[in-house]
Image (tube, grey):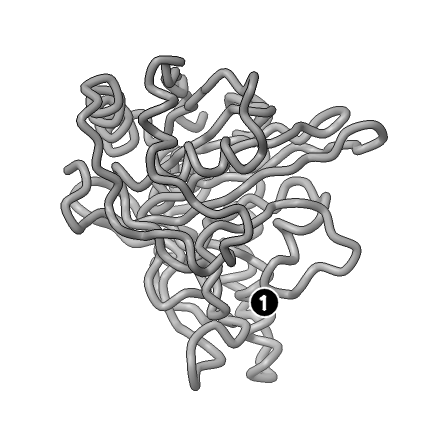
Amino acid sequence: MAKEFTIPEFTIPGAAVPALLERGIEADTPLDKWPTEAFRTTSTEIQELADGILAAVRGQAGGVVVRVAPEGLSDHDLSTLYWNFFGALFRAVPQYSSGELIYPVEVQASAAETSHYSNSNKAGNYHTDGTLLPQLPDVAFLFGLSAATGGGETLLMDVDGLVEQLARIDPAHVAELSRPVPFDVKDQMAGVRIKRQPVLTSTPDGYELRYVRLYIEQAFAAENTPVPTELQAAMDAFDEVSAAAAVTAEAVLLERGVGLLWDNRRMLHGRRPFQETHSSRRLRRVYGVLGEGRAE
């Protein structure tokens, strides 16, 4: 059975909110122009909270839930607050070649191919973010502005537990996913259509994961080559393992004021189905890397 874990929760106290809004961001700031300089504060509450969150994300938990009371805060206030808090920990990086640093995860009538999942109401499709970028983001962060009428919870699964289960089924599947395979990068890298990288990479700290099955299948199609039988079987088995793990995985409802931050290199994520009859699922997403004087 895949390894189970409890996602730790952290609350930003109301007394720390004014400090997190000290660096203002104009409401009409383009999505690719939000400030990426490290957020500095003298608030010991924020510094201690940041240290605890970083330790949890980089430690056994692999992810954390962050909460702030949303009363009295506009959508832009919440976005500014969480952007600045994220900037105390990580350096935000663009999510697409078009440069968006903070991205609306909302259902759109016509989703771009690069946002086929984040701009739709698709469920499942467990994946890692940023596989089409030149560098995989170290972390991903989602926070809620409003929840759907029903459903839409986000799920996290630790890749090491999934690999253990996959190896029990057949160690050859792990070996197959550890070889470089083509990914369609959807024009996100200048002059590059296909990038080859392994789905699984063994490191001294455990496995790293890069997985969006659709992009792998589209890369083979672009090369007019069938997906090898062994790779097809390995991905089928991995999807079965992750689908089974998702049944008991901890679910986080990203309602207004609730954020989920995770290690994007070692956590698989996805979401449950949702309905938007009376309320829409509106999230904001940020990618980040460590560095430039952030918490370490």
Residue at the disc numbered 1: 217
* The one of 91 and 126 positioned closer to us in this rendering: 91
Residue at the right extreme, as displayed = 277
- What is the three-letter code of the residue carrying label 1? Glu
* The one of 5 and 105 positioned closer to us in this rendering: 105
State how many labels appear.
1
Position in image of residue 40 (x %, y %): 21, 37
* The one of 86 and 273 positioned closer to us in this rendering: 86
Q: Name the residue: 48% across, 47% down.
A: 26
* The one of 72 and 170 positioned closer to us in this rendering: 72
Query: Is 45 displayed left or right of 108 in the figure?
Result: left
Query: Is 39 displayed left or right of 188 in the figure?
Result: left
Q: Name the residue: 34% across, 47% down.
A: 265
CA neighbours of label 1 inside 10 A, class few (<14), some (14 to 19), many (20+): some
Position in image of residue 268 (x %, y %): 46, 41
Q: Name the residue: 72% across, 29% down.
A: 148
- Compared with residue 88, is residue 11 higher up or lower down, i.e. above or below? above
Position in image of residue 169 (x %, y %): 46, 40
Query: Is 161 displayed left or right of 103 in the figure?
Result: left
Position in image of residue 270 (x %, y %): 56, 39
Q: Quadrant of the N terminus?
A: top left
Q: Quadrant of the C terminus?
A: top left
- Determine which quarter of the picture holds residue 201: bottom left
Q: Name the residue: 45% across, 65% down.
A: 99
Is disc 1 placed on a helix, strand or loop? helix
